[in-house]
Amino acid sequence: MTTWNGDEYQQRFDRLAARGVEVHGEADLVCTFEPGSVLDAGCGTGRVAIELARRGIEVTGVDVDESMLATAAARAPDQTWVRCDLTELELGRTFDVVVMAGNVPLFTPPGTQAALVAGVARHMGERAVLLAGFSLDRGYAVEEYDRDAAAAGLELTERWATWDRQPFTDTSGYAVSVHRRSSSP
C-alpha cells in the first residue's frame, strides 16, 4: 500500500495553479452532468471535491489514506470527508455523479479493481454517472475496467482521452470513461 504525504501531494497542484495551469478539468467535466450531489471516490487532498463544493454542489469525499484526508479536512473543514477503503464503502445513500479522478483504480491493490468498481457503483442513483480517469500504462486496461463495470451493472456510454473530452483512440495513454446503469435486464 502506498503511503502518502497529503500536504506534499497538494503542493504539487498548488504550484501548477500558481503557474496558471488549469487544475480543475475534472470538476469542469463533472459539472456538465449538472449534479446536485457528487461522491468523490478516492478524493485524496480534496482538490476536486473542494472545487465542486465551491461551485455549489454537495460533495462527499472518500479516501483510505489518513494523510490525504487530513489535508483535505484542513483545507475544507466544513465538507464531509470519510476514511474508508472504497471496496468496502457503504454510505447508505446515492449520488448523481460518482467521480474517480487521479488514477484511483491504479492505487487499489492488484486484483481488487472489480470490488472497487462495485463499491462505488452501489452509491450511484438511478440516473447517475460514474466518471473515472486513469493512465493506461500501469497494468489495468480499459477493457478490464469495462468488464468490472459491467459486472457491477454498468455500461460504457462515452470515453475520452482527457478530462476536456479529447477523442479517445487506440494509442491514447489515458482514458476518461462515463458509465451508467445498464439498460439491459
Image (tube, rainbow, N blue to C red):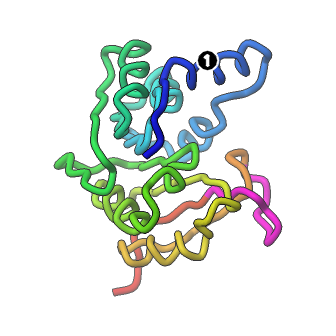
Quarter of the figure that contains the C terminus: bottom left
Q: Where is residue 68 in the image (x, y as percent from the top left)?
A: 43, 28
**Callout 1 amino acid:** Gln
Q: At which x and y percent is residue 31?
A: 54, 39
Element on which disc 1 rests: helix
Magenta span has 74? no
- Vertical placement of residue 146 versus 167, above or below: below
Q: Residue furthest left?
A: 92
Residue 13 picture quarter: top right
Q: In this view, does 137 lie to the left or right of 134?
A: right
- Label 1 Cα neighbours within 10 Å, binned few <14 / some 14-19 / many ≥20: few
99, above or below 19, in the image: below
Would you say 65 lies left or right of 52 here? left
Q: Nearer the viewer, residue 137 or 42?
A: 137
Left or right, 35 with respect to 22, comes to: left
108 relative to 68, above or below: below
Q: Is the magenta stretch mostly helix, strand or loop?
A: loop
How many numbered discs sit on the rendered protein? 1
Q: Is 41 drawn above or below residue 121 in the view shown? A: above
Residue 167 is a magenta residue: yes
Residue 174 at what x, y percent from top left? 71, 56
Q: Name the residue under label 1.
A: 11
Residue at 38% x, 59% y: name it. Answer: 116
Image: magenta residue range: 165-176
The percent coordinates of residue 160 (x first, y second) are 70, 59
Residue drawn at (34%, 65%) of the image:
115
Identified at 44% across, 71% down, the residue is 149
Q: Which residue lies furthest to the bottom in this view?
A: 185
Indicate the quadrant where residue 123 lies.
Answer: bottom left
Is 18 or 155 nearer to us in this picture?
18
